[in-house]
Amino acid sequence: MSVRTRFAPSPTGYLHIGGARTALFCYLHARRHQGQFILRIEDTDRERSTQESVDAILDGMQWLGLDADEGPIFQTDRFDRYAEVVAQLLDSGHAYHCYCSRETLDAERDAQRARGDKPRYSGTCRHNPPAHDPAAQPVVRFRNPEQGDVSWDDAVKGTITVSNTELDDLIIARGDGSPTYNLTVVVDDVDMNISHVVRGDDHVNNTPRQINIYNAMGATLPVFAHVPMILGDDGARLSKRHGAVSVMSYRNMGYLPEALLNYLVRLGWSHGDQELFSLDEMIALFSLDDVNVSASTFNTGKLDWVNQQYIQSLPANRLEQALSWHLQQADINTDKGPAVADAIDLLRERCTHLNEMAEQMAFLYSDDLVYEAKAASKQFKPAAIEPLTLLAETLDSVIDWQADALQSAIVQTVETLGVGFGKVGQPLRLALTGRAAAPANDQILAVLGKTRSIDRIRQAIGWIQSQS
C-alpha cells in the first residue's frame, strides 16, 4: 500500500506550533516510506475562514520547508462532491433529514442536563419524523449504528474502543446544504487515498463517528495516529498566554526553520539520547511507533539552545539566506562593507537568534557609530588618546591584514606603552564597534578592513578630543 498522509489545517488563524508539529510528523512518515504528503485547506467554515489565514498557513509551510506533493487542495472547491455523497447516504438509508428546530434541540438538551444525562440528539426524526413545512430546509443527519462498538488500533495510543451508544446522529449537512467537518474529512481522505491520518489527539472523539461514515461509504479505513498535545510550562495546553505560538512569529524572533523543526520533532518523539537531527536524519529515523503517548511540554530555553547550535554549525551561505529577512527588517544595507558570510563567522559564536545577529552586525555596515554612553564615559577618557594614536600608527604598518598579524600589532602597542592589555583593548573595541561587548579585536579588525579600522580609531580620537 502506498503511504499517503495529509496535513489539513482550517484557515481560521495562523499556522500554530501544534499544527506545525503535526505537519512535520505527516511529512516525515510520508518521506520515510517514499509516499506522498498532501496539503489540504479545510475552509468549509466560511464565516471564520479568511484569505489572510490561508496565506499565513502557506507562508509557514514554505518557511519550514515542508513542501507538499499535492495541494493546497481547498474543500470549498469540492462542495459538489460532498453533496453527491450526502445524497448517496440518504439513498442507502445511512442518513436522514431532520426538521427539529434549534429551540426544540436546545430544550431537549436542557432537559437531559437537568436529569444528569449526556446531552445528545434523541433521534426524533430518525424514528418518527414530525409534520413539517414542505418549504423547510432540514439538516441531514448520519444514521449512526445503535448497537455494537467502534474499535481501532491507533498507531500512537493503541487500541481504542467506543460504544455506539455513546454516539448520536451527527449533522453531516446543514440546512443550506453546506457539509460539516466530520463528513468532508472522511470524503476527502477516501477520495485522496489517504493511508495514514496523523493528527492531534483532540480529534480522538471524532474518530469513531468518522469510522462509521467510512463503513457506510464502503471505504477502507486508514491507519489513525493521534499525537498528544503540546503543553506550556505550566501544564496547560499551549496558547497565546504562553508566548508566541504562530510559526511565523518564531521566524520573526530569529529562529531558524531547521532549528524549529528539530525542536518540534523531539516534542513527543525520540531516538535514543540524540538531540540534533538533520532533516535527512529525521526522515530516516522517524517512526509513528516511537511517538510518545503522553503530552510534551514546550520549553523555550531548550529551543534557544537548539537554535544556537544551528547558528554555530550551519554553513555561512545558509545562514546568510535566512538572515537576509532580518537585515531588511533592521534596515541594514550590506552592499558596502565586508562579505555577509565573514560577518556571520565573526558573530555566530555570540548569537542565539538571527535578529540578534543582524542587530550586532549593524556596526560593520555603517561608519556613523554612536558610542554606548556608559562605555564611553569609562573608556574614552583623555588617557585613551595615546594608546589609540599609537595603535593607529602600528596598524597602519601592518601589511598582511590577518587576525594573527593584527593581534601582534595590538600586543606590540601594549608592550610599548607598558600598560595592561585592557588599557588598549577596551578603548579599541569601543572605537571599532561603538560597544563595550563585541568579538575579539583582531577578528573585528580583520573583517572591517584596514582603511575603515584606522579611520574609526582616528574618529574615536577626535571624539575624545571634542569631549575634552
Image: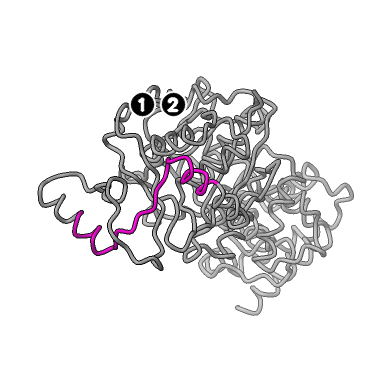
Which residue is drawn at the image coordinates 78% and 67% (left, top)? 455
- Tell me if residue 18 comes above or below residue 291 in the rendering: below
Which residue is drawn at the image coordinates 43% and 41% (left, top)? 93
Amino acid under disc 2:
Asp
Residues at badges 1 and 2 in contact (C-beta under 8 Å)?
A: yes
Specify the label residue 154 is tagged with: 2
Position of residue 75 in the picture relative to residue 461 (left or right): left
**Is residue 99 covered in magenta?**
yes
The image shows residue 122 at horizontal and vertical percentages of: 24, 47
Q: Nearer the viewer, residue 454 or 215?
A: 215
Judged from this view, the residue extending furthest toward the left is 115
Q: Please give the residue where the numbered disc 1 appears in the rendered image.
A: 160
Specify the label residue 352 is tagged with: none
The image shows residue 237 at horizontal and vertical percentages of: 35, 46
The image shows residue 35 at horizontal and vertical percentages of: 68, 30
Q: Secondary structure at mark 1?
A: strand
**Range drawn in magenta:** 85-108
Q: Nearer the viewer, residue 325 or 202?
A: 202
